[in-house]
Image (cartoon, grey):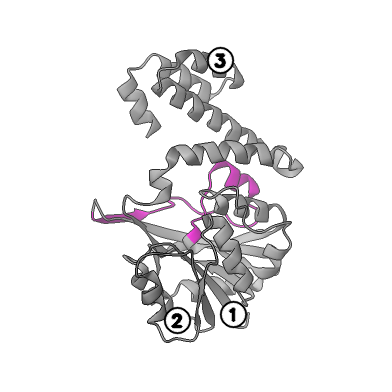
Amino acid sequence: MSEPLVSIIINCYNGEKYLAQAIESVLAQTYPNWEIIFWDNQSTDRSAQIARNYSNPRLKYFYAPEHTGLYAARNFALDKAQGQLFAFLDVDDWWLPDKLARQVPLFGDSQVGFVCANYWIESERKGRRWLAVKRAIPSGWVLSDLLRSYFVGLLTLMIRRTALTSLEYPCDARFPLMGDRDLVVRLSVHWKSACVQEPLAVFRLHGGNETVMKRDRIHDELGRWIEEMEKVDIIRSSPSFRFVRHDFTYQRALNRLLEGDRRSVFRLLPELPYSRFKIKLCAALLMPLFVVRRLKN
């Protein structure tokens, strides 16, 4: 495959603490043909100054006319992108130098609509890092795999422009915390995936990550997302989608148990078929709450 232009979407809202490292990791890429679409979601810190200090003409700065949710902001940034391929980098993460060079050739297969890779999770508090995915990452037609165990890190995701435009809509702004999961699952209905098994990026775990701070909201979004996917025949009919529904019911029941609402737990119990979820939930009903809390975490 020739060297297509890669549009790198960087959405920023008050990201001054880590922003320079994210941008520098793009500048260090061995793959030469890229642009940064920097979408400033009305930051009030030094983010704009940091971004504008780079004189590289490939960094294109845009200031949002109004502050929006994250996935609405991603859509605005995508509208400004000129590339044949899209990649995503949040301001608190960074890439390894060969990230783009290793992933772009995988689009040589015209049926591949999106590409991912493994990545490191680096904990500031613990001072160590570990692999995000500890098994072989599936490739090809991966809808069932994604539903059963979502494995795509946004910081490694690349999407073919024609794959994105083939969808009814790009990112769904109704899912500000799990919009990337929704997008990738919808892509996987009609497009193959490819992956690099080795880690090509680093996800910084710093305690302020939205996915850590807003776990309850993510669970609420997942419930709404399941309702939406019930309307998509190919997803609804997947055995793995039934697994998603049962796991959601189990997690909801654990939340009710931790809130002291045992009556709701007994109402949810019949919704689960005889499975490991039902066995685990019955066991949780017999456990002290501090043990259930550990199970939940």
Q: Is residue 85 visible?
A: yes
As drawn, 147 above or below 3: above
Classed neighbour count for the residue bearing mark 2: other residues with Cα under 10 Å, few (<14), some (14–19), many (≥20): some
Relative horizontal placement of residue 220, taking residue 122 as reference (left or right):
right
Location of residue 79 by image quarter = bottom right
- Indicate whether 231 appears above or below 87: above
Q: Which residues are magenta?
A: 127-154
| Residue ID at (60%, 52%) | 173
What numbered label is drawn on residue 30?
A: 2
Of circles 2 and 3, the one toward us is: 3
Q: Main secondary structure of the magenta part?
A: loop
Residue 142 highlighted magenta (yes or no)? yes
Check disc 2 and give the amino acid type.
Thr
Q: Nearer the viewer, mark 3 or mark 1?
A: 3
Q: Which secondary structure lies at badge 3?
A: helix
Q: Which mark is residue 270?
A: none
Mark 1 touches mark 2? (CB < 8 Å): no
Q: Position of residue 238 (x, y in %)?
A: 69, 39
Residue 267: numbered disc: 3
- Given the image, on which type of amino acid does mark 1 rest? Leu
Quadrant of the rendered image containing residue 293: top left
Question: Mark 1 or mark 2, which has the lower sequence index?
Answer: 1
Secondary structure beneath dot 1 equals: loop
Q: Outermost residue, right direction?
A: 233
Q: CA distance from mark 3 to mark 1?
A: 54 Å
Which numbered mark, 1 or 2, is in the foreground of this view? 1
Q: How many marks?
A: 3
Mark carried by residue 5: 1
| Sequence-wise first label, 2 or 3 | 2
**Quadrant showing the C terminus:** top left
Q: Residue at x 53, y 48 (%)?
A: 178
